Every structure is written in structure tokens, then in C-alpha cells.
Image (cartoon, rainbow, N blue to C red):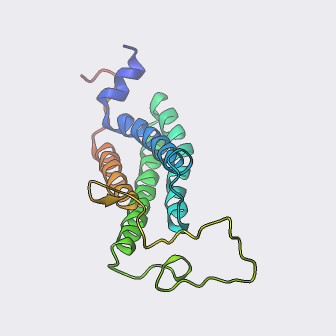
Amino acid sequence: MSDTAGRFLRDPASFAAGVVLAAAVFMILGALFFEHVLGYQPCELCFVQRKPWYALIPVGFALVTFAAKDNRTLLRAGLGLALVVLLVSAGLGAWHAGIEWKWWQGPASCTASGANFTLALPDLSRRVVLCDEAPVRILGLSLAGWNAVFSLGVALLVLRGLLARSRTAGDT
């Protein structure tokens, strides 16, 4: 195993860098799979929840580069940024899941109780997807709920990477 590959497995910060990139790609591909292959149409809030993951793709590439070059300063700064983005993602997922469970009111533009649909230019070929209706639940959680859980899990790995002591190439 090369020294770089070994460092990614031994060093929590480098490992977190790889996880951020892999998780971001996985989440976007998963969302696109549910939309384009399985036919689940996303609501307005689903699209909002994708934005942090889209942002984490280039951040993840940068993190992996910093880790490969052993630039600890930029790696730690990037992990800090990734942590903030992941916490925002978790918050968006939890907020959307709460709207689906009717724990609080969602935006009037995409909920059944406050929908503000205009009929000026009706598009009958497009179904309005409501934010307060979960089209699918897996093990009791909607996709928004799973986004919150997954975001928090990755955030914990990133936090571990941030808090871990820096290792040098000679550490075992």
C-alpha cells in the first residue's frame, strides 16, 4: 500500500476528506437515481437540500488534494467548512422532515395547507409536488429524514478528523 493510501486510512483528517467527497457524490447520485430512475419527483425543498451536497463535491476534491499533499492547515480549514455545510444540510433535512410529519408549517408555496397556486399559466403536464407529503419512507424515515441522519453522521466523522491530533508520516 502506498504511503498516501496508508495515510488516508490511518489519519482521521485524511479519512474524513475522502468521506466528504464520497458522501457528496453518493448523495447526489442517490437523489438523481430516485428522481430519474425510480420516478419520484422532488419538491421545492428537496432541491434546496441538494445544494449543500453539490457544494461539498468541489470541497471534497480540494480536501482530498490537501490530504494527499499533507497540507494540514488547508485540510483543517476545509474540514471546518465541510462541517458547517454538513450541519446546514442536517438542519435542512430535519426541517423538511418535520414539515412532512406536520410538526411545523412549511413554506406556503409548496404545502397543502398553504399552497398558493396561480392558474394564470397552468402547466397540466407537470404535477405540483408538495413539500409536506413524503412520497416514500424507508425504515420509517422520509428521504429528508435520511438526509438529516446521513449529514449528521458525516459531520461526526469530519469533527473526529478535526479533533484528532495530526500524525506525521513516521507515526504508526
Above or below — where is 67 with respect to 91?
above
Q: Which residue occupies the foreground of this view, 82 or 3?
A: 82
Can you give x and y, in whole percent of width and height, for residue 24 in the image? 47, 45
Q: Which residue occupies the foreground of this view, 1 or 25?
A: 25
Can you give x and y, in whole percent of width and height, for residue 18 in the image? 42, 35
Can you give x and y, in whole percent of width and height, for residue 101 in the image? 33, 73
Above or below — where is 29 with respect to 106?
above
- Is 44 displayed left or right of 162 in the figure? right
Q: Where's the C terminus, which quadrant?
A: top left
Can you give x and y, in whole percent of width and height, for residue 132 in the image? 43, 73
Seen at 54% across and 39% down, the residue is: 62
Q: Residue furthest top?
A: 1
Q: How many marks?
A: 0
Seen at 54% across and 68% down, the residue is: 129
- Is 144 displayed left or right of 126 in the figure? left
Q: Where's the N terminus, which quadrant?
A: top left
Q: Residue furthest right?
A: 121
Q: Which residue occupies the foreground of this view, 57 or 94?
A: 94
Q: Residue furthest left?
A: 172
Seen at 32% across and 43% down, the residue is: 161
